[in-house]
Amino acid sequence: MGRYVAVDLGAESGRVQLGTLAGGRVELEEVHRFVNGPLKLDDGLHWDVRAIHREVLHGIAAAARRADGPIDGIAVDAWGCDYGLLDRDGKLLGDPFHYRDHRTDGVMERLLEEIGADEVYAATGIQFMPFNTLFQLVAERGGARLEAASALATIPDLLGYWLSGRLACERTAASTTQLLDVRTGEWARELAVRAGIDAAILPPLVDAGTVLARLLPEIARDAGLEPVPDVIAVGGHDTASAVVSVPARDSDFAFLSSGTWSLLGMELDAPVTSAEARSFNLTNEGGVAGTIRLLRNVMGLWLVQECRRQWAREGADHDYDALQRMAQAAPLGGPLVDPDAPELLHPGDMPARIAQLCERAGQPAPRDAGATIRCALESLACKYRLVLERIERVAGRRAAVVHVVGGGVRNATLCQLAADVLDRPVHAGPVEATALGNVMTQALALGHVDSLEQIRAVVAASFSPAVYEPSADRAAYEQLYARFLTVTRLEPAA
Ligand code: LRH
């Protein structure tokens, strides 16, 4: 029996959940939810991390009121790559930058030219994305904030520090920085130095499943928490926590952590940094219990979120269910785009950008909102196939089933399209995989469960996924995929 508070921070919202483990089953109750989003300041896009902290404290107090017994642990997970910088006294220097800010434009290309992409990939095994912490730090080299910094804190570590008073960098979060050596699990200090970053700002590393310290006494007192729970480092990177709770019964699966991003990949025991993995720009992210997630970031439901925001600005406020219904009603086989086109990464008029990409590739632009969302979803499903085939090739095995977890589980149209285009069953659920992974890694830290296998068995006993079988009309989906390859000029794996 155990009770845990999971703080799960996403780019669109933050959730605080009370998790209860009893009788080999786990339950979650959402006790607090708040909106998250970019903070626009004169010098670019940031996160209002102090406001996030206040919401987290409200959530912890709400969990304390709700729980019918003592709370054992509290842990935070969040999106990857972003960070705060702390001065000598542990004070936050400014608001952390948002990874979709333009300050990193061109930085990655210049740095890799300077210090060699092959070396960086061999050392870190991380896919090159312009917003990896490494490139964000290079973008602010010489700036006042970095000059004054004595420690770097990734977002989950920063919140963990504010709750416990102890600053450490949990390894799954560290792995998203592209400053962690994938071979040794220690900081790639030499790489930091070559990139002109003072390696002294990199805090001590800890593994997921480490008790950091007791919750700070004043926070416990204000929340009415007695006895005082432990603050635990779990898979601080949200994707690491999500994959912990994939309800797989064996290792024959691929996962798709579906939310703002689509993180599609397979779980491995060891990293693969071969020339092929590098040419496919696959990432080897550090997971919980020493696992590696060989995966690729696909642009994900960001496309839909950003379309929705644009239409709302124009006065048409569709909710996500309505958008999904409109997409479902639009015919199969409209225009397709590469969802990972760099033009789609930053906030802006997403419907217009999608239309431009379609036209540039000689296709008519989607006619209306339903067709635009359909274009986004079909394009995502096609990109999943390209990515999964590449990953299977590098991993040297085929996934019999794809487990979809996260908020994207609610998008039945996308789950069915994924099954159809990937030509294999998709098992969708749980929606709250990240918070569950967070809770169950706390249980692991406190000795309430003893392995990743046991965690997955508990999750499988507690939630039944929705199963989507691939369509029997293979020709239609093979044609769709062939057309995707033609219009995007992407090379298939084999
Ligand atoms: C998903 C995620 C992803 C990172 C991105 C910045 O929430 O953590 O794994 O690449 O955010």
Image (cartoon, grey):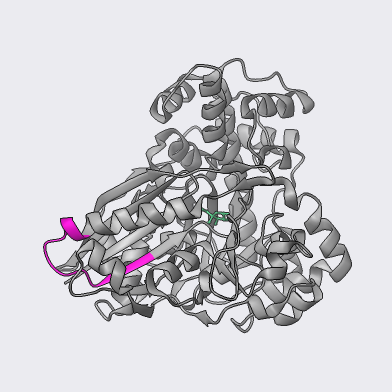
Residue 26: x %, y % from top left: 22, 62
On screen, residue 74 above or below 346: below
Task: Out of 183 and 229, give the one closest to the viewer.
Answer: 229
Task: Out of 369 and 403, give the one closest to the viewer.
Answer: 369
Q: Residue at x 67, y 43 (%)?
A: 340
Task: Out of 491 and 157, give the one closest to the viewer.
Answer: 157
Residue 141: x %, y % from top left: 77, 64
Q: Is residue 447 left or right of residue 314?
A: left
Residue 2: x %, y % from top left: 20, 71
Residue reaching furthest to the left: 68
- The quarter of the picture where residue 96 lies is bottom right
Residue reaching furthest to the right: 114
Q: Residue at x 19, y 64 (%)?
A: 224
Q: Is residue 374 magenta?
A: no
- The quarter of the picture where residue 408 lies is top left
Task: Out of 77 and 343, give the one closest to the viewer.
Answer: 77
Q: Is residue 475 visible?
A: no
Q: Residue at x 38, y 54 (%)?
A: 54
In terms of image quarters, where does ligand 1 lie? bottom right
Q: Report the number of numbered marks.
A: 0
Q: Please identify the quadrant where the C terminus is shown.
A: bottom right
Residue reaching furthest to the front: 89
Q: Residue at x 39, y 28 (%)?
A: 321
- The quarter of the picture where residue 110 lies is bottom right
On screen, residue 212 above or below 68: below
Q: Which residues are magenta?
A: 64-75
Q: Is residue 70 magenta?
A: yes
On screen, residue 365 above or below 208: above
Q: Please identify the quadrant where the N terminus is shown.
A: bottom left
Q: Is residue 447 visible?
A: yes
